[in-house]
């Protein structure tokens, strides 16, 4: 029987560390870290996620502020809000929930967030730092994936890892983190020829295609580690919506370990958002260095990622 990797429990452990860091900042006379969350429109799934994030902030002592804007907000108004938040010292992290309404260019908006406040790690400066192994803020879901893998695999050196999915928010950054940890990484997607055969070679599969039950039991070799990033809402036979992952969970008993959906990667994403926010605050307070756009000159002390180690 495959072990089930308990994302909620691992996230709770990380939250304890984050909370202790917040308490230490307060004890040293610093104001509490602050996270500003921007939500444009009223997509129900986005509202659920934002509510979870705000509740999680409360648990660890991060001050959160929600900015809910109407669905017809202009791009200029959104950029103006971001400029205001960029300039406020009490704002350590800014998260603009995606997807955004169609009148707004997400690349422009994510690129407008100050890189040292970009706790999502989506700004091109942070993307560039990740891909060069030079620090920066690491996106929350990929960071959470690395921590889940670390809970069952001691050393990734030379491990064959297949990533399914090539998104900017999961597939590409998680591939970079795995390469930093000396894994052999194959990045695939739903159009990859022979995907099942490629997956059957893998010691570890990270499924992030957003395709429900894509990875079937016969795609998985005995003893593999499976990380399921996919979350799709479907209507069950009882008429209730349920969440399904990219992995056919009931077919992979022969794996060594698998993350459930829900209760796997999702809670880790939120825990990593909190830890990124505290890290951003520590940099703002001068305790740590090297987050943000302090190029040229380059980083002197990579904070979040380094060759051969999993960022913490
Ligand atoms: N700027 C931005 N940053 C994000 O990090 C971001 C985003 N936009 N847009 C949407 C995605 C999605 N996302 C999730 C976070 C937590 C769970 C989570 O906690 N899931 C629970 C289930 C929650 C439920 O019931 O829906 C679980 O898997 O156990 C899921 C998904 C963050 N995202």
Image: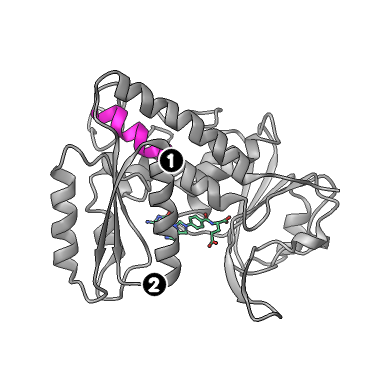
- Residue 311, how many percent across, how many down? 50, 32
Q: Is mark 1 within 8 Å of ligand 1?
A: no
Q: Residues within 10 Å of mark 1 (few under 14, many from 20)?
A: some
Residue 43 image label: 2
Q: Which residue is mark 1?
A: 59
Looking at the rendering, the stretch of residues picked out in magenta corresponds to: 274-284
- Residue 62, how many percent across, how many down? 34, 39
At 25% from the left edge and 70% from the top edge, which residue is drawn?
104
Say left or right for 66 vs 235. left
Q: Secondary structure at mark 2?
A: loop
Near-viewer residue (253 or 67): 67
From where the camera sits, is residue 78 visible? yes
- Residue 189, how many percent across, how many down? 60, 63
Say left or right for 15 vs 154. left
At 27% from the left edge and 42% from the top edge, which residue is drawn?
117
Say left or right for 24 vs 117. right
Q: Secondary structure at mark 1?
A: helix
- Residue 10, how many percent across, how many down? 60, 38
Nearer the observer, disc 2 or disc 1?
Answer: 1
At 66% from the left edge and 35% from the top edge, which residue is drawn?
151
């Amino acid at each position: 029987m495959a072990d089930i990797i308990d994302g909620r429990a691992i996230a709770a452990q990380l939250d304890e560390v984050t909370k202790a860091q917040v308490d230490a900042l307060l004890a040293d006379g610093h104001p509490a870290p602050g996270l500003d969350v921007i939500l444009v429109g009223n997509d129900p799934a986005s509202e659920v996620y934002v509510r979870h994030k705000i509740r999680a902030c409360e648990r660890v002592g991060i001050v959160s502020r929600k900015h809910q804007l109407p669905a017809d907000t202009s791009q200029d108004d959104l950029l103006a809000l971001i400029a205001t938040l960029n300039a406020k010292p009490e704002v350590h992290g800014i998260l603009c929930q995606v997807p955004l309404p169609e009148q707004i260019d997400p690349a422009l908006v994510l690129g407008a967030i100050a890189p040292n406040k970009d706790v999502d790690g989506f700004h091109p400066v942070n993307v560039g730092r990740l891909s060069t192994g030079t620090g920066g803020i690491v996106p929350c879901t990929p960071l959470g994936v690395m921590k889940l893998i670390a809970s069952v695999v001691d050393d990734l050196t030379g491990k064959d890892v297949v990533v399914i999915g090539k998104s900017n928010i999961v597939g590409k950054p998680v591939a970079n983190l795995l390469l930093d940890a000396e894994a052999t990484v194959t990045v695939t997607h739903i159009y990859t020829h022979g995907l099942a055969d490629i997956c059957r070679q893998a010691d570890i599969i990270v499924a992030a295609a957003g395709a429900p039950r894509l990875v079937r039991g016969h795609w998985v070799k005995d003893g593999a580690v499976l990380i399921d990033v996919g979350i799709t809402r479907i209507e069950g036979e009882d008429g209730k919506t349920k969440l399904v992952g990219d992995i056919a969970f009931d077919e992979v008993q022969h794996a060594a370990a698998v993350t459930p959906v829900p209760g796997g990667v999702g809670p880790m994403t939120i825990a990593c958002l909190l830890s990124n926010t505290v890290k951003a605050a520590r940099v703002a307070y001068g305790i740590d260095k090297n987050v943000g756009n302090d190029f040229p000159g380059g980083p002197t002390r990579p904070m979040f990622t380094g060759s051969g180690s999993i960022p913490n």
